[in-house]
Image (tube, helix red, strand yellow):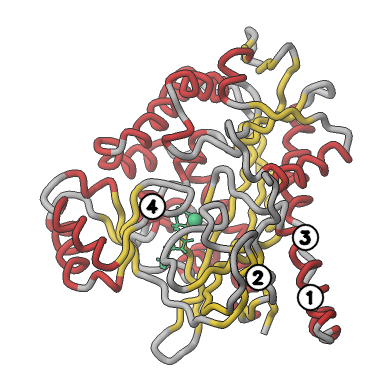
Amino acid sequence: QVVNYAPFTLLPSAVPSALFEQAYAVQQDFNLLVDAISQNKEFLEHTLASTIKVDDFTARLFRIYTQVLDEGLAQSVFLGINRSDYMFDCGVDGTPALKQIEINTIAASFGGLTSRTAVVHGRVLKVLGKSKEASRLLPNNPSKGLALGIVKAWELYGSQSAVVMFLVEEVQRNIFDQRCVENELWDRNIRVIRKRFRDVFEKGSLDDARRLYMDGQEVAVVYYREGYMPKNYDQQNWEARLLLERSRAVKCPDIATQLAGTKKVQQELSRPGTLERLLSGHTDAVARIRATFAGLYSLDMGKEGDKIVAMAIADPDRFVLKPQREGGGNNLYGEELRQVLEKIKDSPERTSYILMDKIKPQPAMNYLLRAHSPLHVSQCISELGIFGVYVRQGKEMVMNTAAGHLLRTKAIEHADGGVAAGVAVLDTPYLV
Ligand code: ADP
Ligand code: MG
């Protein structure tokens, strides 16, 4: 009664192969970009200045970030596991274009479960007598790709007896997704422990060299699958987070990289000249990244922000209003967007949001299979995610890869929400 299958589509969904390849081709660029931002204090400070005045959660993360920098970083190996999400925007002439929804730099999930979905969909196609189509489904194994990043970071940390710690939620509904990654580590003779913030608060400690110990075991890598939303934290959990960040252990991600994934940063990246400054000398990478951007707008106080607010109120269906939150179900659309903007348009509270052009994909029919839900055909849209994995030692990038993909599909009546939010389901791309 407590274990359900992860929801999935009955059939794989069509994905334009050119856009699929484009998403893979830009992933290493995004890895470089996120990593560059995480090392750019001036950029983070300047970009988040208005946000941290009004958004307490971002402000608290930012305080830990500056505190750790002031003390001096003990960490010298950096591991990023991110997922860049896209939808296929249908232009006026019907040609689809790849547009980024966001990049997740902390706790990007479903790399494990999605390593199995192609097999499920291959079987379904065979049952339907479509063996040729089944053989065209691409193999996909992000759990291995993610694990290889963790392995690399563990090796560079350089202590044979140290463990990898998965930092997990109090109640972990998505444990099997995490186990897929964990199993890859045990297969390579790396010990894994699963702990909560509360355990770290009670049993975590640092030695003089700021090595992290849990129950007397040295921890080489902390892989966060938690800690990205306000409800993950009480006062003790904040203290545990600070302890982890101060430590020498490789955090995936460190707090700077988490901040690099905020929606405010995403919006600032779209300003002309910003990418060029952050990735100077990488002209092609800048062009590839920019091609995936949808329109993004700042609501900071001032004339520019006033104009944007008026534009959104006049035509709310063209936009999405996003607060600095992760995990799905936080964005505002349509009439609700208009009402909220009307209410906060003259208050600095508006700077805790960003505005984004709404992406409008072409819907397709599919069946969404969910435990205890009736089966019926729905009009659906899909979101493609590419997993990025990179490792940096000091100033040197020693690994930079695209580690696999995730396709999630939902019925069009849901504007927001992912798989964990109970809206989207796991899918497999069928390239066309
Ligand atoms: P979160 O951090 O909560 O996952 P996202 O930015 O990914 O926030 O938005 C959540 C969901 O809302 C997405 O998975 C997508 O379905 C929908 N969404 C977000 N931005 C847009 C957009 N610009 N156009 C259309 N749908 C969007
Ligand atoms: Mg998202």
Q: Secondary structure at mark 3?
A: helix
Question: CA separation, marks 1 and 3?
Answer: 13 Å
Pointer 2 residue: 9
Pointer 1 residue: 124
Q: Closer to the camera: disc 1 or disc 3?
A: 1
Q: Nearer the viewer, residue 169 or 357?
A: 169
At horizontal 79% and vertical 75% (from top left) the residue drawn is: 124
Label located before the other in sequence (3 or 2):
2
Q: Is mark 4 within 8 Å of ligand 1?
A: yes
Check residue 33 in the rendering and tell me which mark sits there, or answer none.
none
At horizontal 65% and vertical 25% (from top left) the residue drawn is: 249
Q: Is residue 400 above or below residue 430?
A: above
Q: Amino acid at mark 2?
A: Thr
Question: CA separation, marks 3 and 4?
Answer: 29 Å
Say if mark 1 contacts mark 2, CB within 8 Å: no
Say if mark 1 contacts mark 4, CB within 8 Å: no
Q: Secondary structure at mark 2?
A: strand
Q: Nearer the viewer, residue 207 or 46?
A: 207
Pointer 4 residue: 330
